[in-house]
Image (cartoon, helix red, strand yellow):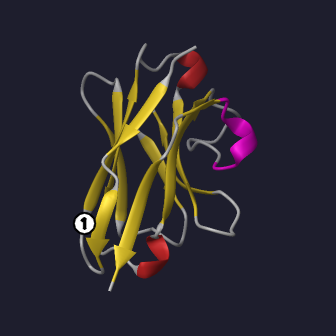
Amino acid sequence: QSRLVESGGGSVQVGGSLRLSCTAASGFTDDTNCIAWFRQAPGKDREGIATLYSNFGTTYYSNSVKGRFTISQDNGKNTVYLEMNGLKLEDTAMYYCAAGPKRGRGSECYSGIRFYHVWGQGTRVTVSS
């Protein structure tokens, strides 16, 4: 089972940018061809904010990050990124990378927690004014 390692978190001011990385030690396979970024703020549920279907590059974004965040995969396909621009105070959270198999017939991967079985340890993002 592929292990995921996130990096790139840190502290940034409102309006700033960060790029998170998620590297799969054994690469992404058919069992992990949906890769997603989740985040969990203190006292809140974990929410899926971006997904990537590795086979075709199709993406999904939650309304809370659409237009500001971009999920992408490197050419070697072992690393998935989350480019975060225009950061807001409410983006402060622990960010997790997860992977799982493509479900359903749509072109996008689902954003629910239950569809992902491989998780990273998380990387913290703190946005301050």
The residue under label 1 is 17
Q: x, y percentage for residue 6?
A: 40, 39
In the picture, the quarter occupied by the C terminus is bottom left
Q: Which residue is outermost to the right?
A: 114
| Residue closer to the observer: 82 or 11 | 11
Q: Residues within 10 Å of mark 1 (few under 14, many from 20)?
A: some
User: Is residue 92 toward the left or the right of residue 109 in the image?
Assistant: left
Q: Residue at x 66, y 57 (%)?
A: 46
Q: Residue at x 42, y 32 (%)?
A: 5
Magenta stretch, residue numbers: 111-117
Which residue shows up at 34% across the image and 23% down it?
78
| Residue 99, placed above or below residue 126 | above
Q: Quadrant of residue 1?
A: top right
Q: Nearer the viewer, residue 74 or 11?
A: 11
Q: Amino acid at mark 1?
A: Ser
Please state if 23 lies on the left or on the right of 120 as rendered: left
Q: Is residue 57 visible?
A: yes
